[in-house]
Amino acid sequence: MRRVEIFDTTLRDGEQSAGVNLHLHEKLEIAYALEQYGVDIMEAGFPASSPAEFQAVKRIAKEIRNVSVAGLARSVEKDIDQAWEALKEASNPRIHIFIATSPIHMEYKLRMKPEEVVENAVRSVRYASRFFSNIEWSAEDATRSEWDFLAKIITQVIDAGATVINIPDTVGYTQPQEYVGLIQYLKEHVPNLYRVKLSAHCHDDLGLAVANTLAAIQSGVDQIEGTINGIGERAGNASLEEIGVALKVRQDHYQVETGLRIDQTIRISKLVSKLTGMPVPPNKAVVGANAFAHESGIHQDGVLKNTLTYEIISPEMVGLSSNKLVLGKHSGSHAFREKLTELGLKLKEEDILRLFSAFKELTGKKKEITDDDILALVVENANPGQKYEFNFLQVSYGSNMIPTTTIGMTTPLGEFKQESATGKGSVESIFNAIAKLVDEKIELLDYRIQSTTGGEDSLAEVYVKAKIGSMTTSGRGVDNDVLYASAKAFADAVNRAYMKRKIDEENSETVQDKGVIAH
């Protein structure tokens, strides 16, 4: 099976994304991940662009030993010298020289005649061959260049010493059929093309970068270029993770293979997203948060019966443990019952029907229903005596006094308990009183409050996140009184933890912490 090499330019073209500025340690972290991911070549940067960039490329070239490290250079001797100084310690250094070949670039950007461009390109490649045995040459804006001129200049740079010829769709202008036509033309009109590797580099301005790259692969290119998550200037580059998975899933069609370790896909996508500060859109192919998520009842029912009904990529292939059934307003009873089973909830049929009705009502207020929300529904619909319930709440506060809360609750065992506690503020005193009442170590991780509507009749909605024993849970409370809403949120978190612990015990699962117990 034919092998296509992967040229990653996340650290160069990807970093040129607006607002991205990677520090040396961040570049190194991505470089190590790319090595683990299995790319063949990584373009570490543009050494002549700045002293910091030079040092970054030099460090990566020294550290990375299993991947060819490349550096970008313009067709000028100074850039080539800088590239060699930065890359000479690499195990397999490559220089990537480029010059524009389209009429509009030659006239308005370079202000050079076509003959001058050919002469400059040949001279630069010959100069680079003094240092490098691995020379990639790019015809910038190749897809808007005149084909006969492109064939002419490529023929001459190959004779000058180029080992890889890159045909970039620099502004994302071409269409798959056009790109295929250009590649075929060059194969027919460049007599020495057989001596080099042919590479495709596509941008996504018209949303065709991946499609154009796959078309180029079918046309027989030896190398393709792109970035993780498709980052890059303007609309970005071809997404390497999408191409890698497409070639894997449709190997029957493309009949090619790569060295990519596809199971590292999610890991490297998240790393690049985190370090560049560029979030991955939820609906992005392969690595988006929704790529393996199903909310439609019809889809959920099909996936639960056989994942192949709606998943052509297995989550495990790209490094996920499983798909995700999102519970929302489109979900059906099959997915809801599956979630109850997953949470270890063993309920009677009438209880399930009542909970499903409450679940559907909740989806009208909340877009996505979490596991904690399901537990909250169980708690809210539980019979008396199965949860902690308020009897009264009294909070004393004044500008010259310590806030004090007294609270009375009925425990899940039906016992009435009362506790008092102080705090630096009223909310803290409520929290401390509830913690004393349940006799459990509780650590408050997050506390948020917002109004549900505008105006003086607005309700206060309080959200808390707490660690109870070894379990992290959340709680929600709504009331027209902020303090009572806070107390309800704390109690809700305690009840969710209690319910989960009770489920675990009933299912004979190992319980390492005593958890929230009824006293």
Image (cartoon, helix red, strand yellow):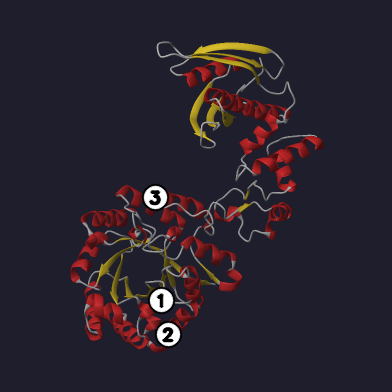
Q: In this view, does 282 lie to the left or right of 171?
A: right
Q: Mark 1 points at which residue?
A: 198
> What's the residue at 21%, 83% (across, down)?
116
| Label 3 Cα neighbours within 10 Å, binned few <14 / some 14-19 / many ≥20 | few
The answer to whether residue 509 is seen in the rendering is: no
Relative image position of residue 400 (x, y in whole percent): 40, 11
Residue positioned most to the right = 349
| Snapshot quadrant of residue 515 | top right
Give the numbered dot on residue 277: 3
| Label 2 Cα neighbours within 10 Å, binned few <14 / some 14-19 / many ≥20 | some
Report the amino acid beneath label 1. Answer: Leu
Dot 3 or dot 1: first in sequence order is 1
Total numbered badges shown on the rendered structure: 3
> What's the residue at 53%, 60% (across, down)?
285
| Label 1 Cα neighbours within 10 Å, binned few <14 / some 14-19 / many ≥20 | many
| Snapshot quadrant of residue 473 | top right
The answer to whether residue 484 is seen in the rendering is: yes
Report the amino acid beneath label 3. Answer: Gly
Instruction: Check the image and report above or below for 124 versus 312.
Output: below
Please state which of residues 218 and 180 is positioned toward the viewer in this rendering.
Answer: 180
Secondary structure at badge 1 equals strand
Give the numbered dot on residue 187: 2
Q: How far apart are marks 3 and 1 (CA)?
A: 33 Å
